[in-house]
Amino acid sequence: MSLTPKSPMNASLESLLTDVAAARVRYVDFVRQLTEEQAHYKPAPAVWSAVEITEHLFWAEHGGIWGMWRALQAYRAGKPVWTEEHSNRGRSIEEIINLTWQPKEQVPATAAPRMGGTLAFWCASLLSLQQLLEAFCQAVANEDLEAIINPHPISGPLDIRQRLEFLRFHIDRHRGQAATLLSQSNAIP
């Protein structure tokens, strides 16, 4: 039984959803190549391992999807979560990141890796978020994506289109970090 009625998605929303799914699969396909030893490799105590990156991606996306649902519900109730100016209106997520992020950002505690475990568990957990995201996209399909604002802790106000772009960007960014870890772990004799 579906809790969310099916709504036809417009091409733009469908494309955003597909882009996130593709980024998630690219990431998981890449890190699944790692041995468990490589997945836990840390070149320094303050650097996350691939397992920690994958756990972070799960918590960050889980929180992001939760926030978008909350913003949608508040918007529909006439009590939007963001009532100030949308200072990022019309910008791509890459432009927003360039304007708002420092080279080394502090992750919010809710998105920090904290449980540990195996790479396989966190990959399966990350993949499971696609169902939540699809349900959200069905729920928001008939709404104005740029009217619903869910602020990001670093980047400020992001509309739903930008939030979906952020999920794709964030996953791809961390795939690059995992690739760097792999090259560093392979260089160790």
Image (spheres, rainbow, N blue to C red):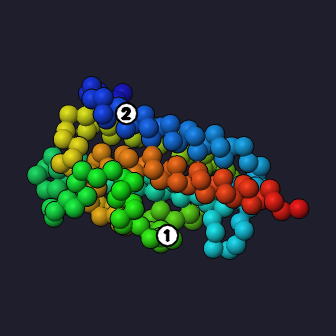
From the viewer's perspective, is the residue at label 1 or at label 2 nearer? Answer: 1
For residue 143, which quarter of the picture?
Answer: top left
- State the residue at coordinates (55%, 46%): 125
The reply, left or right, for residue 158 in relation to residue 166 is: left
Residue shown at 68% from the left, 43% from the top = 32
Q: Is residue 71 visible?
A: no
Q: Residues within 10 Å of mark 2 (few under 14, many from 20)?
A: few
Helix, strand or loop status at disc 2: helix
At which x and y percent is residue 35? 77, 49
| Image quarter hosting the N terminus | top left
Q: Position of residue 181 (x, y in %)?
A: 69, 59
Identify the residue position indicated by label 2 in the image: 15
Depth order, front residue of 161/108: 161
Query: What residue is shown with label 1?
Result: 103
Question: Which three-letter amino acid code belongs to the residue tagged 2?
Answer: Ser
The one of 126 and 15 positioned closer to us in this rendering: 15
Q: Residue furthest left?
A: 78
Residue 49: image quadrant is bottom right
- Secondary structure at numbered mark 1: loop
Closer to the camera in the image, 125 or 90 = 90
**Camera-side residue of 146 and 61:** 146
